[in-house]
Image (tube, grey):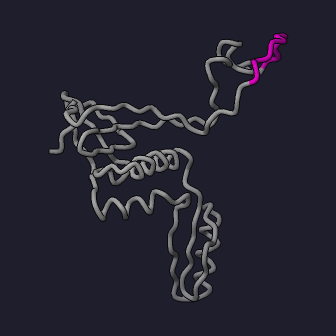
Amino acid sequence: MAATLGDLVSGDELRTVSVLRAKRFDEKTVTAASAKSLQMKREAEEHDGWELAKENKRSLRMRRLKPEDRQLEDDVWTLFYRMGFKEMNADRNLMVIGKDGATRRQLDVFAKDDETVFIVECTHSRDWRGPAAEAAGGSEGPQNGTSSSRSVSPPALPEPPLWRGRLRNWTSSAMISQP
């Protein structure tokens, strides 16, 4: 596969991106000319799931938790940043295009240093079920809404992690090149 990469950052830009990715919240500032219009904007933002973080005379700082899938990607990205990788993707728009030009694949994390390149795709599932549960009978209930006379219950599973990520490691001579 040939690669068309999104923006890669290094140095001071990398530090700036890391500050945003390390936060658990999305933040934005809402401004208005009058207190009445600011209050109307606040109510609209709260209706959309934002909460007030800070209130000023003519502006509000609003925040909300990042979606779980994006938080997972940001946590993995931050892990590689803390491990000292020198060049990483700036955002979620890292695309790899196949030789045929039609195959596209979005990757979540690209981390590169002098010796190693990591390409990471994060997989998130709210309802994680491990192989032990699948072997014990698949799902916990009937699929079509009817009752089941089956009395076998799946074995108790340890608390699953909130995420599972797959890592693939290639040396710097990988098939990734910057156009």
Residue at left 60%, top 87%? 35
Foreground of the two, 165 or 141 = 165
Where are the magenta residues, as a range? Answer: 146-156
Q: Is residue 57 left or right of residue 109?
A: right
| Residue 11 locus on image (x, y percent) | 28, 61
| Foreground of the two, 71 or 39 | 71
Q: Return the residue nearer the eye: 95 or 43.
A: 95
- Compared to residue 109, the image places residue 143 above or below, namely above
Q: Where the C terminus falls, by quadrant?
A: top left
What residue do we see at 29% from left, 31% from top?
Answer: 170
Left or right: 86 in relation to 21: left
Measuring from the top left, give residue 147's x and y in whole percent: 82, 17
Q: Image quarter for residue 56?
A: bottom right
Task: State whether residue 146 is above or below residue 175.
Answer: above
Q: Residue furthest left?
A: 179
Q: Is residue 82 above or below residue 153?
A: below
Q: Position of residue 109 (x, y in %)?
A: 37, 43
Q: Going by the image, does 4 lie left or right of 75?
A: left
Name the residue at 35% across, 51% down: 84
Using the image as rendered, state which of residue 16 and residue 141 is in the foreground: 16
